[in-house]
Image: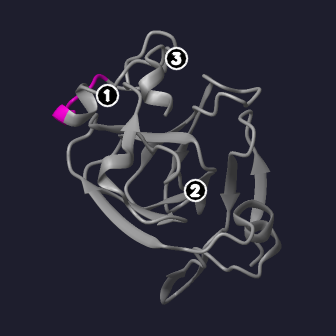
Amino acid sequence: MTAELKPTPLNGVFELHAPPFADHRGAFLNAFRAQEPAFIGSWGDRGIAQVNLSRTEAVGTIRGLHRQAEPHSEAKLVRCLRGRVWDVAVDLRTDSTTYGQWHALKLSPDQGNALLLPEGCAHGFQVLEPGSELLYLHSGAWVPEAETGVRWDDPTLAIAWPLPVAALSDRDRNLPWLSDRNSMA
């Protein structure tokens, strides 16, 4: 089945739909196929430097909003493998016409969708079902000293999280505000 690329209101951020094939045996989803036009149009010639899996148990937990600072910026393709999450992209590229804006969508295996974020955008999500699992493809390697982001509750962003916050890491609680230029480095 062919994947479909849908632009979002944020420059360079796309929703990918690759519906799973299902029959009496179960289901099959092609999560990434470099030669498919939708992936070529969104991922381009970026390589895959890292693949991560995350599982979050508690409904309402927020993870993010994370990104890596230049020169270690990376693109991400995020797909939900189990459960359901409310996935958020925030444009932190100061030269972008959509700088400081956010876009969210629900990711789930049933929908077969994924979110592609280009370099310079932050990513976060809130868990809508217990035991939700995400698969991340990264175009760059993780560099601990390049970790940054912006706070999930930044009043400038005013992200309308769908649930009360159940859990948040100390790291995420202490990320800088959007107005703090150190978060944009």
Mark 3 crowdedness (10 Å alpha carbons): few <14, some 14-19, many ≥20? some
In the rendered view, tell whether residue 15 sits above or below residue 148.
Answer: below
Q: Which mark identifies residue 75? A: 2
**Which residue appears at 51% of the width and 11% of the height?**
156
Q: Amino acid at mark 1?
A: Leu
For mark 1, what is the residue?
175
Q: Which residues are magenta?
A: 164-170
**Which residue appears at 61% of the width and 75% of the height?**
32
Q: Secondary structure at mark 3?
A: loop
The stretch drawn in magenta includes residue 169: yes
Q: Secondary structure at mark 1?
A: loop
Q: Amino acid at mark 3?
A: Leu
Please give left or right for residue 169 compared with residue 90 in the image: left
In the rendered view, tell whether residue 179 sits above or below residue 42.
Answer: above
The label nearer to you, 3 versus 2, is 2
Are the residues tagged 2 and 1 within 8 Å (C-beta)?
Answer: no
Compare marks 2 and 1 and give the one earlier in the sequence.
2
Q: Position of residue 135 (x, y in %)?
A: 43, 65
